[in-house]
Each structure stands twice: as structure tokens, then as C-alpha cells.
Amino acid sequence: MHPALSIVFFTTASGLGYGLAMLLGLDILDSAAISTRAAYLVALVLIGAGLLSSTLHLGNPQRAWRALSQWRSSWLSREGAMAIITFIPLLISAWLSAMDGRYSPVSGVLQIIFSLITVYCTAMIYASLKSVHAWHTKLTPLCYLLFAIAGGTVLALFFAACESGPVRALAATAIVALAVAWTAKSVWRNRMRDTKPLSSPESATGLGFIGSVRLLERPHVTENYLTREMGFRIARKHAAKLTRISFILGAVVPFILVVVVLAAGQGTVGVICSLLAIIAFAAGIVVERWLFFAEARHAVMNYYGG
């Protein structure tokens, strides 16, 4: 499918923001520290920027508010509603940290729960689509959640390194989170590569009982919306190359840098390495999310010989 850059940015930025919000909700960082107040600001900016960018993919962005009305049946509406609800405890926690330098267990727990639910709803927008075989699996929301937690942990590590935070504890947690997240993603990719899609030209046309079905003539001579959006293709060699790039940037580089932070502890080395780890992880996730869309094959392309 066609990878819209606004959606790639949205899932990357909001995932990092919600992941950081989860870590802040655990009260791991000192609420009175300047770095913690900056962390709340970064979380809010990432979430807000991500949500705003998601509206750019709409035909009429000014009508985006109407999507909230279908929360009973639409994962997109549920995600929008939960994103707004999550702002409430997160803003309360940010205010208490900025004004009073204290932590509220109630708002902290709520921001963790709501952040998890919001990321899950985002992932279910894609996982609920039976027409896209690669996405329609429980591994999709699992990967989204694990990447959010891993990214949030690496972000929290940076803010802990800026002041006297639990650097080594967070570094050890980040190492585990990165390993688990990319392991789950590898399983997801193996499933996409090895599992045969349920939809085929035979099942799509209902002519499978006759034998093999092949396309004699395309439904349209020129391109249309379906062929542009659903028929996007990426060469296998490019996909393999980008997969390696996403893994190196998002997993290998952050892993090595976090190990250095674990060994160095508090100090300039920890700050620089944790910052570089964030940049590398974010770049790797951007490539991973681009591939998430680019490699997905919609069942409608069975009618176009795809």
C-alpha cells in the first residue's frame, strides 16, 4: 500500500510520546527535576504533533472531528477519543510536576493505562483489516506496544542521564525492551513472508472451483485511486535493504549506545549516547513504519493482477 508520510510520522511520533508518558507515569524520574518537566513537555509535543500530522492524510482535514462520532464500531474513532482522554491525566501530571514538583499516583496510573489503550487502538486500525493479510494478526498491536515502550524507555533514559536519575536501571530496561520489540517484529515479518494470504484471485472471483484464475484484461486502462493507494509496490531487493537499515538503526545502534550508557552511568557520556540512541531508534522506526505500509498487499489488487 502507499505509505503516506503523514501517517508514518504520526505513528512514529505519537508512539514515542505515549511511550515516554508511560515511563513518566511510573514515577521513575524525579518530578521536581527540570529534566522531568522537559520530559513531560516533549511527550506532549510528540503526541500533539503526531495527532495533527495524521489529519493531513484526510481529504478534508477540517472535518477530522467527525471521526470521533463512530467510536462504537471504528478503531479510528476509538483512537481519536482515547487520544483526547489521555491528555487529561497527562496534562495534570505535567502541571503538578511543573508547578509543585510532585507526582500524583492517580493521574500517573491513568496516563499509563490510557496511553497503552491509545497505542493499542492505533494498531488495531490496521490489525482489524482482514483485507490486508500482513496486518491482520495479533502481532501487529503487540509490535506497536513494544516499540512504544522501547522508545519511551530510551527517551526516559536520556532525561535520567541529564540529572540524577536511575540511569543504569533504565539502561538495563531499555536493552531488554529493544530486544523484545525487535524480536516480535522479526516474528511479524516471518509471518508476512511465509504465510499464504487467505485472499487470492480464485477466492476473489469465486472461480476457484474451475481451476487457476489469471487476469485477461485490467478493469481500468489508466491508474485510479485503488491502483495508486492499494497497488503500491516496492522491489524485493529494496525491501530487504530497507529492512536491514531499519534493524541496524532501530535495534543495533541503540542497543550498543545503551550498553555504553549502562557501563558509563551518570555523566556527559551517558547524555550524549542516550541522545544518539533516541535519534537512531526514531530513524529506524520511520523506516520500519514506511515498510509496514509499502509491503502490505490489499486484497483488492487480486482484481488488478497484483
Image (spheres, rainbow, N blue to C red):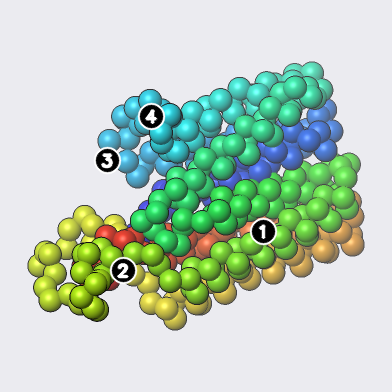
Q: CA distance from mark 4 to mark 2?
A: 31 Å
Q: Quadrant of residue 70?
A: top left
Does any portion of residue 152 appear in the rendered image? yes
Residue type at mark 2 is Ser
Residue drawn at x 75%, y 45% as measured from the top left? 156
Can you identify the residue that label 1 sits on?
181
Callout 1 secondary element: helix
Identify the residue at the far top of this view: 100
Q: CA distance from mark 4 to mark 1?
A: 31 Å
Can you identify the residue that label 3 sits on?
59
Can you identify the residue that label 2 sits on?
200
- Mark nearest the camera among 4 and 1 is 4
Residue type at mark 4 is Gln
Around disc 4, counting alpha carbons within 10 Å, would you say few (fewer than 14), some (14 to 19), or many (20 or more)?
few
Does any portion of residue 33 appear in the rendered image? no
Can you identify the residue that label 4 sits on?
70
- Mark nearest the camera among 3 and 2 is 2
Which mark sits nearer the N-terminus, 4 or 3? 3
